[in-house]
Amino acid sequence: MSKLALPILFVLSLGSLLLGCQSTESAPEESHSGITDSLTQQESQVELIKEIDQSRLLAWLDSPATPLTLIDVRSPEEYATGHIDRAINIPHYKIIANPSLVSQFSDHPVVIYCRSGARASKVTDALKQSGLTQNIYHLQGDIIAWNEAKLPLVVE
């Protein structure tokens, strides 16, 4: 019987060892998963700048109950040739140099647009780098799409 007990003891020990190794090997995966979960939570805390479509912007503009700042980041000359009603003009290079120019408006929605999206994208990148993303929106299609939809412009 002792000849039989020794192999059984060996198999049980080996099984225990293998199970122990298996749980040790899965611990790093759990740890990695925990890191991934932690990064996902951190990424979700970083608010990205959202896109807004023309119909939603029009609804906001039509609603007196919605405080809104609309920033046209084109040049003053472009702005004068036609801009969306209630838009203020702050050229993109000024915001890039001083993103805090936008922070004074960020207690309510701020919508940024340019001609095609290139300058607005540079502005939103500068705002992201400065941590100013809350309540910031980019108008989809910018002024080109606005014109294509034959939506109204104010000309000065």
Image: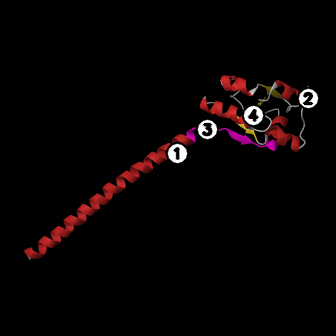
Instruction: List the residue tagged with mark 4.
Output: 111
Q: Residue 155, labelled with which disc?
A: 2
Circle nearer the N terminus (4, 2): 4
User: Can residue 53 be found in the magenta stretch?
Assistant: yes
- Give the alpha-carbon distance from disc 4 to disc 2, as whole Å: 19 Å
Answer above or below: position of 35 versus 7.
above
Q: Position of residue 6 (x, y in %)?
A: 12, 71
**What's drawn in magenta, residue-wise?**
44-56
Circle nearer the N terminus (1, 3): 1
Circle nearer the N terminus (4, 1): 1
Residue 136: image quadrant is: top right
Going by the numbered disc 3, the residue's amino acid type is Glu
Query: Which residue is painted at 62% across and 33% down in the image?
Result: 128
Instruction: List the residue tagged with mark 1.
Output: 40
Q: Which mark is in front, 3 or 2?
A: 2
- Give the alpha-carbon distance from disc 1 to disc 2, as whole Å: 46 Å
Instruction: List the residue tagged with mark 3.
Output: 47
**Element assignment for label 3:** loop
Q: Position of residue 9 (x, y in %)?
A: 16, 68
